[in-house]
Amino acid sequence: MLLPIMPSMFGRMTGSSRRRSTRIAWAETVNVVAATTAASVSEATINFMARQVGPFYRAIHLGPSVTDWSVGGRVFFTGELPPSRRSGVIMLGSHGHHSYTENAMKALEGVRVLDMTHVQSGPTCTQLLAWFGADVIKVERPGKGDATRSQLRDIPDVDSLYFTMLNHNKRSITLNTKHETGKDIFTRLIQECDVLAENFAPGALDRMGFSWERIQEINPRIIYASVKGFGPGPYEDCKVYENVAQCTGGGASTTGFPDGPPVVAGAQIGDSGTGLHLALGIVSALFQREKSGRGQRVVCAMQDGVLNLCRVKLRDQQRLAHGPLKEYPQYPNGTFGEATPRAGNASGGGQPGWIVKCKGWETDPDAYIYVIAQAAAFDGLARAVGHEDWLNDPQWNTPAARLPKIDQMFTEIEQWTQTKPKLEVMEILNPLNVPCGPVLSMKELSEEPSLRETGTVVEVDHPTRGPYLTVGNPIKLSDSPAEVQRSPLLGEHTDEVLRDVLGMDEATIEAAKAEGAV
Ligand code: CAO
């Protein structure tokens, strides 16, 4: 008899079930496989079981390649699917036992994403979904692929780091979505997927014949997610890249020194920042679909994403109407204009902070540390930098007294920090509860053992480039560990996806190739 399976069982996976599971050779990329050896249990019953568990759960049917799946009263099976298709699985046997694969269940397992994204913003989003276990099928133009495959190449004829570092854990298929057969295949993929993500120039998918209305017709449950440069308005048709978004979203006008030009940040708040926003939108829409049964449109404009990240600067814009911004370096000697000004390295919060030089700054461009002179830890800071005299001096011993002299205070602090390497400064100040952080270079970050240990910096092997470093999933889920798998080669999974997801036979796949559709 088949037993009902509840999704919560995934969360209670024990060490012994992990070990036991290593005997399972493969499983389809679905959340639940309901299966049985009993001839009396029909295919319809198996499908019914999967649907009871939830909308992300599907049944698969054990084909003739399944040779052995009942061992010693437990249920196992073996088969021929490649390891890349293994995933969390519960099987029901005629004895009512269940088991798991060696991989813990992933948060988004069973979610299939049709990934039309390219360059940086969209791929950031779908890479996160892939790390959380979604089956992300990246659709690329035959022969060309994502433009970043060949941009900023460091090794001839090898996928660039730009591409490999943004497309981990995905499958790649080539498909010409402007070709008639390609459109048929695309339509069938829309039917099979939970999410369609894209970040083309405005209207590109509509021009291919896939408007939101048409996509909903094909699959009312699909979530159609897009990154665009701007929301509806005067600029909605514009193409946008990172720095354009940083300029139009408020980042550049508020970054830099008061007497210098606007500056863009190294952190990719326009592209990767908006990709992060989109990922949250997609996951929220999937959650809502659990209740509504319907998909929906998710759109993130890069201008909106950057402005969201610059929220505190819009706060300051409104504070300006009520007097000078006292934590800005313009106070009290400089002037404020009509808009939030650039604040150099001043702390964005209510506590004064600045970047000060450390030992070696003359030759090392990163020999600096950020120090916050928080009121609560000021005594310790003053003593550490050799200014015990400040503690009893009414000119220095209150935040209000120090406020007009912040420049002078950090000059004094810097006299001390310049005598010590940045990490030593941190070691001294941290126990005193003085918030501080050394300026770490990309070289230092790439060599930092603790980041390697947590999987935030990972070495990945690639068949044509060899080993390379990348940033792993910065979001850590205790029940959904993210292993970083290399990015796919162009079209590496075309046959596999057409065969396994769409059920196309070899002859039809070959015909589509010959036509130039895939
Ligand atoms: N088969 C057939 N055609 C395909 C295809 C496929 N698999 N994939 C893409 N194409 C076509 C598109 O349909 C489009 O054709 P049309 O112009 O005829 O509609 C064409 O390829 C080029 O797409 P694009 O205009 O999006 O690409 P671009 O290089 O000119 O512009 C970018 C790139 C990023 C500026 C633009 O896509 C954009 O503004 N996107 C939205 C904002 C965004 O995400 N920016 C961040 C980028 S990361 O820095």
Image (cartoon, helix red, strand yellow):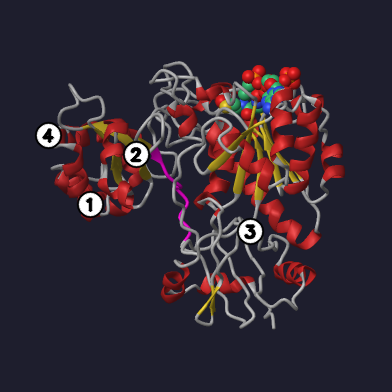
Image check: 265 left or right of 210? left
* Front of the two marks 1 and 2: 2
Q: Nearer the viewer, mark 3 or mark 2?
A: 3
Amino acid under disc 3: Val
**Residue under the image location 55 percent in, 41 percent down:** 170
How far apart in space, not on screen, are marks 1 and 2 (Cα)? 16 Å
Q: Circle 3 is placed at which residue position?
A: 30
Report which residue position mark 1 lands on.
379
Q: Report the disc number at residue 419.
A: 4
User: Mark 1 near mark 3, Cβ–Cβ under 8 Å?
Assistant: no
Vertical order, 355 against 17 (above or below): above
Query: CA gap, disc 3 to disc 2?
Result: 51 Å
**Marking on residue 42:** none
Q: Secondary structure at mark 2?
A: strand
Circle 1: residue type: Asp
**Is residue 393 left or right of 24 when viewed as pictured?**
left
In contact (CB < 8 Å): disc 4 and disc 3: no
Residue in the foreground of this view, choosing between 265 and 255: 265
- For the residue marked with disc 2, what is the amino acid? Gly
Query: Would you say the beta carbon of the disc 3 residue lies within 8 angstroms of ligand 1?
Result: no
Please name the residue that numbered disc 2 is placed on.
Answer: 353
Q: How far is disc 1 from disc 3 in space, using C-alphas? A: 59 Å
